[in-house]
Image: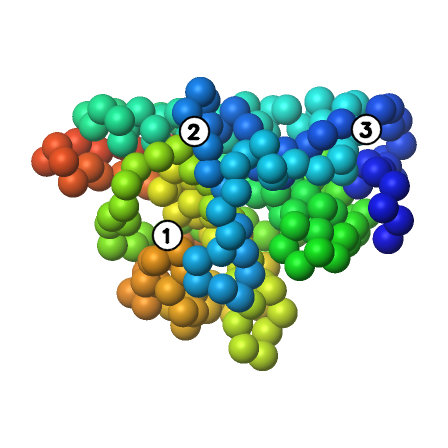
């Protein structure tokens, strides 16, 4: 692939000037110090600041059309950050369909930027059409909620995305942690719960007893500092 900056959505037409696209949404971090963790095939991944997680892979016109995805993940991020900062019983309503497309946006951007292994790869026209809601998402691609033991570590605003490649398989899972809320994108043929349970610990999390739910209607975060304080995330799906 040429090193000349080009928009990964150019097959749609209507491109204008190229922009610096953050691989994950910068607004997730607010004014706090920011950490992005990513990797494939390693348990801990690589940690970088948000300003280093950018590439000239999307034009301004197409970037603007995806801003609704950024807005929804920022809404989710702010709710989780508020929960960890000041634990109390609260709830937030989230459009799960937009979160699914945001996850696809990150995956497409990571491939286009060559962030994992240095190889830049363009997504298929079908994937681009799905990202821009011109076609429905592949039936196998969905957000999966994960129930795991409490994640214990120093709290800071962070996003992790970790492509998981199991022995004898292509990459068919991407784990996301948005302020320690675990979400999974899965495109494999088998059972995602069995697949995740068979992986080695990732980012310090043991998934051997994880429960995985496709398109969850609700997820909860519970505080270990304030007994009974929990954030309920209510997901709705429009497509």
Q: Of the numbered discs in the image, which one, if any, rests on residue 146?
A: 1
Compared to residue 188, the image places residue 11 above or below, namely above
Question: Residue 7, image x and y in percent?
Answer: 82, 36
Find residue 33 and report its image quarter. top left
Q: CA distance from mark 3 to mark 2?
A: 27 Å
Residue 136 relative to residue 80: left or right = right
Residue 67 relative to residue 200: left or right = right
Residue 9 in view, yes or no: no
Q: Secondary structure at mark 3?
A: strand
Residue contact between numbered discs 3 and 2, judged by CB atoms under 8 Å? no
From the image, tell me which residue sits under label 2: 33
Q: Secondary structure at mark 1?
A: strand
Q: Which residue lies most toward the left here?
A: 227
Q: Which residue lies most toward the bottom here?
A: 168
How many residues crowd mark 1 within 10 Å: few (<14), some (14–19), many (20+)? many
From the image, tell me which residue sits under label 3: 18
Lower position in the chain sequence, tag 2 or tag 1: 2
Lower position in the chain sequence, tag 3 or tag 2: 3
Q: Nearer the viewer, residue 63 or 23?
A: 23
How many residues crowd mark 2 within 10 Å: few (<14), some (14–19), many (20+)? few
Question: Residue 81, image x and y in percent?
Answer: 34, 29
Question: Residue 13, image x and y in percent?
Answer: 89, 32
Question: Residue 16, image x and y in percent?
Answer: 86, 24
Could you tell me which quadrant the C terminus lies in? top right
Q: Nearer the viewer, mark 3 or mark 1?
A: 3
Q: CA distance from mark 2 to mark 1?
A: 26 Å
Q: Nearer the viewer, residue 84 or 35?
A: 35
Q: Nearer the viewer, residue 118 or 144?
A: 118
């Amino acid at each position: 692939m040429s090193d000349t900056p080009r928009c990964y959505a150019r097959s749609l037409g209507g491109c204008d000037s190229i922009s610096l696209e953050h691989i994950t949404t910068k607004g997730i971090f607010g004014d706090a110090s920011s950490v992005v963790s990513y990797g494939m095939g390693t348990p801990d991944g690589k940690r970088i600041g948000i300003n280093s997680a950018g590439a000239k892979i999307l034009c301004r016109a197409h970037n603007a059309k995806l801003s609704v995805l950024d807005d929804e993940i920022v809404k989710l991020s702010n709710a989780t950050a508020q929960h960890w900062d000041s634990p109390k019983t609260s709830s937030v309503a989230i459009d799960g369909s937009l979160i699914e497309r945001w996850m696809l946006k990150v995956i497409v951007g990571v491939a286009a930027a060559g962030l994992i292994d240095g190889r830049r790869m363009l997504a298929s026209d079908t994937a681009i059409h799905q990202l821009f809601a011109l076609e429905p998402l592949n039936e196998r691609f969905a957000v999966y909620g994960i129930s795991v033991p409490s994640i214990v570590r120093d709290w800071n605003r962070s996003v992790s995305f970790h492509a998981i490649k199991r022995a004898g398989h292509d990459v068919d899972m991407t784990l996301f942690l948005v302020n320690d809320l675990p979400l999974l994108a899965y495109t494999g043929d088998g059972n995602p719960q069995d697949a995740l349970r068979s992986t080695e610990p990732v980012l310090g999390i043991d998934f051997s007893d994880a429960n995985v739910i496709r398109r969850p209607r609700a997820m909860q975060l519970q505080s270990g500092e304030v007994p009974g304080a929990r954030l309920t995330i209510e997901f709705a799906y429009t497509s």
